Structure formats: structure tokens, C-alpha cells
Image: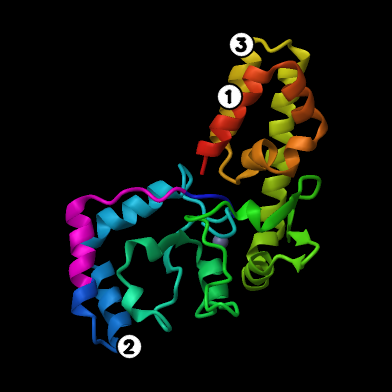
């Protein structure tokens, strides 16, 4: 799971969704589901589907596991419990079929009535999760108050996040990023080495750059050396990592 930036929809597409929302104002869950299915088969849904795909990066990876192809549109708040949000742009996200099935209608709410599933389009998932870069495994954050509720709920529902292919991809991405940082250090901050680091960040669709730039990863050996020796390159890395999906 990595931070995603929601793109702006064109006005005409926003209007199309707004009209659909009005048309289902008093509809049952079953009728809303049918309306959504019908809408998905129309041309009006194409720009929305494309906008969602553009948020998912060049390889259109799943917003939850970050690994498999995001072939489905998921309603973050499920139609079963939030039918009025079926055509809400902010409630749509591209995910893979496996994650979509795992999530199903599960959408835990906390004692405050707010969702406990992490929405990667509104916040950085690393604020609730931690990474072991050696294995690529993700766990809920642990604080004095206990395990992070959002992290726990998300990982309990989306076990796919720690499926072998997903953890392996994260482990490899972490290695590539550290390798590029080491190249900068070994090559005295050469233009070529800076370029390679920049390319690695741009190619990272797993949120690992953010981990090294903004979270615990920044306290590891190479990031620390980079900060100490080549501050400008480090700052460029941090800025670029914040922009990646
Ligand atoms: Zn997935």
C-alpha cells in the first residue's frame, strides 16, 4: 500500500457522477448496485475509469496490495452500507480482483464511527504501517498505546498486502533504492549517480522511497550518510519521494 494522489476530474465527468448520485437518492442497495453496473457499461464511465488508472501509476497497480494489476473499481465505502456514495468520485479506487474480493463488504468502523481501513488517497499509509525492508513485510505500527487500529484492521482484511509476490517486490525495490544511494556515496555525488537515484524513485510504485525519505528508513545507514555528505541530493530525493504514488 502506498500513498496515491487523487486527480481532478473534468467538470463534465463530475457532473455525470453528480447526476447519477441524484438519481439514486432513494434507491435500494440492489437498485444502486444495478445502476452502478449499468453505468460501468456506458461511455460516460470511461474517462472516470481512465482517471482512476492514471492515479495507479504507469503499471496500474492495485491501490491496496500495490502488486497485482488493478482491473477493478472498488468503492472504498462499500455500496452495501453506503449506497449513496456509489457515484462519489472520492469513494472510487482501482484495485486488483483478489483485494476486491478479500475486502468485499467488510468496512470496519471504530468507536468514533469513522472507518478503520486506510484510505491511501487521503493519507500516507506509512503513518499506520511499518516496513521491514529486509523481508518486504508490512506490519501495523506499534506505539505505547498498542498496535495502530488502522494498520491492524487494514492488514486483517487485506492479507494480500503481505502475500509473497508483494513482499518480494518491496524487498527488491528497497534493495534497488539503497543500491542507488550507495552509488551516489561511492561515486562522490556524480551527476550520473544522482540521475540513477532519481530514476529509481520515479520507478518506485510501492511507496518504498517515501519510507526512506520520510519514515524510519531515513535512519538507516545509506540515507544517514547521504544526509550528512550530500544534503542537496538528499533533499532532492525527499522532494521526489513525496511526489511519487
Ligand atoms: Zn491487490
Which comes sooner in the sequence, label 2 or label 1?
2
| Magenta-drawn stretch contains 19 | yes
Q: What percent of the width, then of the height, locates residue 194?
A: 62, 18
Disc 3 under 8 Å from ligand 1? The reply is: no
Tags 3 and 1 in contact by the CB under 8 Å rule? no
Which residue, given by chain and number where applicable, does mark 3 sit on?
Answer: 191
Residue 148, position in %: x, y?
70, 65
Q: Secondary structure at mark 1?
A: helix
> In which quadrant of the rendered view does residue 13 lie?
bottom left
Q: Secondary structure at mark 2?
A: helix
Q: In the rendering, which numbered label is found on residue 34?
A: none
Cα distance in 3D space between marks 3 and 1: 13 Å
Q: In this rendering, is residue 122 above or below 79?
A: above
Q: Is residue 151 above or below residue 54?
A: below
**Residue 5 makes an appearance in the image:** yes
Residue at 35% x, 80% y is 83
Q: Earlier in the sequence, mark 3 or mark 1?
A: 3
The answer to whether residue 79 is above or below residue 189 is below
The part of the chain drawn in magenta is 5-20
Q: State the CA–CA distance, disc 2 to disc 3.
A: 59 Å
Which is the main secondary structure of the residues drawn in magenta?
Answer: helix
Query: Could you tell me which residue is drawn at 19 percent across and 52 percent down?
Result: 11
| Mark sitting on residue 30 | 2
Residue 160 falls inside the magenta stretch: no
Amino acid at each position: 500500500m502506498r500513498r496515491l494522489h487523487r486527480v481532478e476530474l473534468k467538470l463534465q465527468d463530475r457532473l455525470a457522477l453528480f447526476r447519477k448520485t441524484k438519481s439514486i437518492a432513494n434507491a435500494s442497495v440492489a437498485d444502486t448496485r444495478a445502476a452502478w453496473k449499468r453505468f460501468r457499461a456506458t461511455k460516460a464511465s470511461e474517462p472516470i475509469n481512465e482517471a482512476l488508472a492514471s492515479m495507479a501509476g504507469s503499471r496500474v497497480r492495485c491501490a491496496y496490495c500495490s502488486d497485482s494489476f488493478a482491473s477493478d473499481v472498488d468503492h472504498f465505502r462499500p455500496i452495501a452500507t453506503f449506497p449513496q456514495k456509489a457515484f462519489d468520485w472520492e469513494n472510487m479506487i482501482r484495485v486488483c480482483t483478489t483485494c476486491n474480493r478479500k475486502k468485499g463488504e467488510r468496512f470496519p468502523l471504530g468507536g468514533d464511527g469513522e472507518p478503520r481501513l486506510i484510505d491511501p488517497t487521503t493519507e500516507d499509509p506509512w503513518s499506520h504501517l511499518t516496513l521491514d525492508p529486509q523481508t518486504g513485510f508490512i506490519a501495523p505500527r506499534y506505539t505505547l498505546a498498542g498496535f495502530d487500529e488502522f494498520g491492524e484492521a487494514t492488514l486483517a482484511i487485506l492479507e494480500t498486502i503481505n502475500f509473497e509476490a508483494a513482499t518480494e517486490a518491496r524487498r527488491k525495490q528497497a534493495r534497488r533504492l539503497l543500491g542507488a544511494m550507495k552509488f551516489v556515496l561511492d561515486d562522490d555525488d556524480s551527476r550520473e549517480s544522482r540521475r540513477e537515484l532519481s530514476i529509481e524513485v520515479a520507478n518506485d510504485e510501492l511507496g518504498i522511497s517515501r519510507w526512506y525519505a520520510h519514515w524510519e528508513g531515513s535512519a538507516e545507514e545509506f540515507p544517514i550518510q547521504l544526509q550528512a555528505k550530500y544534503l542537496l541530493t538528499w533533499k532532492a530525493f525527499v522532494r521526489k519521494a513525496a511526489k511519487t504514488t
